[in-house]
Amino acid sequence: RVMNKGQHDTFKSTCCYCGVGCGVEIKVEKNGSVSVVGNQSHPVNHGKLCSKGLNLQYTVNDRSDRLLYPQMRYHKSMPLQRVSWDDALDRTAAVFQTFVEQYGPDSVAFYASGQCLTEEYYVLNKLVKGFIGTNNIDTNSRLCMSSAVAAYKKTLGEDSVPICYDDIELSDCFLVEGANPAWCHPILWRRVEAHKVNNPRTKIIVVDPRVTDSCAVADLHLQINPGTDIVLNYAIGRLLIERGDIDLDFLERHTEGYPEYKTRVMERTLLEAAAICGVPAEDIELAATFIGESTGFLTMWTMGLNQSAIGVNKNLSLMNLNLITGKIGKPGSGPFSLTGQPNAMGGREVGGLANLLPAHRNMNNAQHRDELQKFWSGTTVSEKPGLTATEMFEALLDGRLKAIWILCTNPLTSLPNARLVERALEKAKFVVVQEISNKPQTLSYADVILPAAAWAEKEGAMTNSERRISHLQKAIMPPGEALPDAEILCRFAQKMGFNGFSYHKTEDIYREHVRLTAGTNITIDGLDYDVIDALNTVQWPYQKRRKMGTARLFQDGKFHTDSGRALLHSPPDDHHSERPDSNFPLILTTGRIRDQWHTMSKTGKVNKLNQHIQDAFLEIHPRDAAALQIENGELVSVLSLRGNVRVKARVSATIKPGVVFLPMHWGKILGSDLNRANNLTNDLVDPVSKEPDFKFCAVRVEKYKKE
Ligand code: SF4
């Protein structure tokens, strides 16, 4: 795998942060130190990296916080002590076996991450669903893309992102809703910006309650009230219909549900919709004009739509705009969900969520479950969906769940209603934490700690937002006794007495995953690491005979639904988030900042990245700050029914009056938990996707008073 022997060895990999999936080269010097540069030949980024990617090497070289050996305690009251891998996994297997025998397989659960490699996801899913006999495996992708997954399935028949990044240069209208790609998907956004410069007639519409950096190149910013996206999308839909800017031929031949949709969008007048959304009616008209006049139309979105108690419905209402205009499956057009995590898409391919099965098989399909049981030679796959992320911690709290295995994620910072998560982990009978860092607070609840290899220390595959599969080469050895996550899971499976987990190398896992996709709509039959390397990444589905991937889906107008038609859904446009009242009069929304990633366990170690924004802050509009007599930079308390946060106020007209914003990165990992946004958020979830309502809860802001 070594490309270049000289002063250093060079390995190809993919950035481990966002779902853009930029290619990188890891250069390992003779003294063992690592540098990371953009891969000039990678089709996604052509050598460019954003601030996070440019600083990857610091997170790789700084091993001061790494977990080096397994640790275990025999009783909750005892301290953790160093043990061998065999001791740690023997005890873990014995405890899991006991719970499964006494309480059934649904008494244990595994909570993983969209940062896991495809092979890790695959063996974990096989272990849990195919051998332990429960579907209690979920990941932090539940907090990220599950609303989009559900909406793609409802609309297109399967979780299939239709577009490719090259559609950016072929589009002349972008509707960016609930996303700030200038900060969260920077390399992709640079392509949009460059396209706009080269083609000034291209229109960019940004929909967001905040004025973000993405608005800098926008022709129109619709600063809507939180929770009103469906109202806005229906209002745009109504205008497009009234103006005749829809594709009736496409609707007739390739969709179902248009009459119901038309009835639904006619329920509100433009003026009503504008009043609910809190934007001028003329601006909604202008958005409809831009869309109606376009030849290529991309809808782009991420957490502003997904992380909502009506996340699926918001997604459906946006995808409808592509369907009524017939702008899907065509160059420059389609719905384009911006994946948050680097391998959330790979996890979806192998069915790595509590309600999914590998290769887009359906849990409620007996034939699909049977195929898996036969393929794995394991136990019967349960038809009962497993516990989702937030449900797992609720089940720990009420005693239904006895044991949880947390790998590659930091739920005490990232899950909503963090105090509930704390209480759940206190109540858990057995907690396994598989981690690279000694920082996350979950470790203090662990009965067993398993040290994992980090990015650059293991081999595997990832899939980015445009279905592009990359092969990540192992560049360096993990420190101490740390092991790749897939190897840890395989060793555990063998301790449990399960067959089918003695792979000679990681690629054998990948090949098994590939075989399971044969004959499905996401087939990558014929793919292995050599083929991916030879093709320099490949987009699924892979066409074995032509030895090439597929850039764009649904070009023939045939969708993956039973009827072959895309389905327009017309849900109600109201929302049921926690309403502000006289006690908690403001709406809190949470989100990312430019230079931090998730809960900062990696980016928080890099001085350069910390310099951008050093501390958590509360963004508040000058009108609200004045009413509360709060000055810019002043310490404030933010309170909700769940808890409180103490941060400095950032008084800024960039946020809508009545709305406040907290970044989601800070939490117990870096000491005090009084800057943890999730002290405030509630555990309300979308009823279909089970994605939490991170973008809407009621809070009160006060001047900070010392106790
Ligand atoms: Fe990494 Fe995303 Fe930045 Fe690319 S845009 S370098 S994938 S964080």
Image (tube, rainbow, N blue to C red):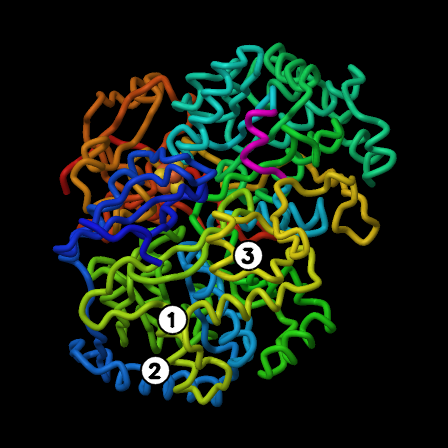
The percent position of residue 365, horizontal first and vertical second, equals 72, 68
Q: Residue at x 61, y 39 (%)?
A: 315
User: In this rendering, is residue 625 above or below 680?
Assistant: above
Gap in Å between the C-alphas at discs 3 and 2? Answer: 27 Å
The answer to whether 269 appears left or right of 3 in the picture is right
**Residue 257 part of the magenta segment:** no
Gap in Å between the C-alphas at discs 1 and 2? Answer: 10 Å
Q: How many marks?
A: 3
Mark closer to the chain start, 3 or 2: 2
Q: Tag 2's secondary structure?
A: helix
Mark closer to the chain start, 1 or 3: 3
Q: Bin the neighbour count of mark 3 within 10 Å (Cα to Cα): few under 14, some 14-19, many 20 and up.
A: many
The amino acid sitting under disc 2 is: Thr
Identify the residue position indicated by label 3 in the image: 348
Q: Which mark is residue 92?
A: 2
Q: Nearer the viewer, residue 119 or 690?
A: 119
Tell me which corner region of the image, top left, top right, bottom left or bottom right, holds residue 162.
Answer: top right
Q: Tag 1's secondary structure?
A: strand
The part of the chain drawn in magenta is 163-170
> Do the residues bearing badges 3 and 2 touch, measured as CB atoms within 8 Å?
no
Q: Which mark is residue 405?
A: 1
Q: Residue furthest front?
A: 6
Q: Tag 3's secondary structure?
A: helix
Q: Nearer the viewer, residue 369 or 641?
A: 369
The answer to whether 50 appears left or right of 229 in the picture is left
The percent position of residue 372, horizontal first and vertical second, equals 64, 74
The amino acid sitting under disc 1 is: Trp
The quarter of the rendered structure image containing the C terminus is top left
> Do the residues bearing badges 1 and 2 touch, measured as CB atoms within 8 Å?
yes
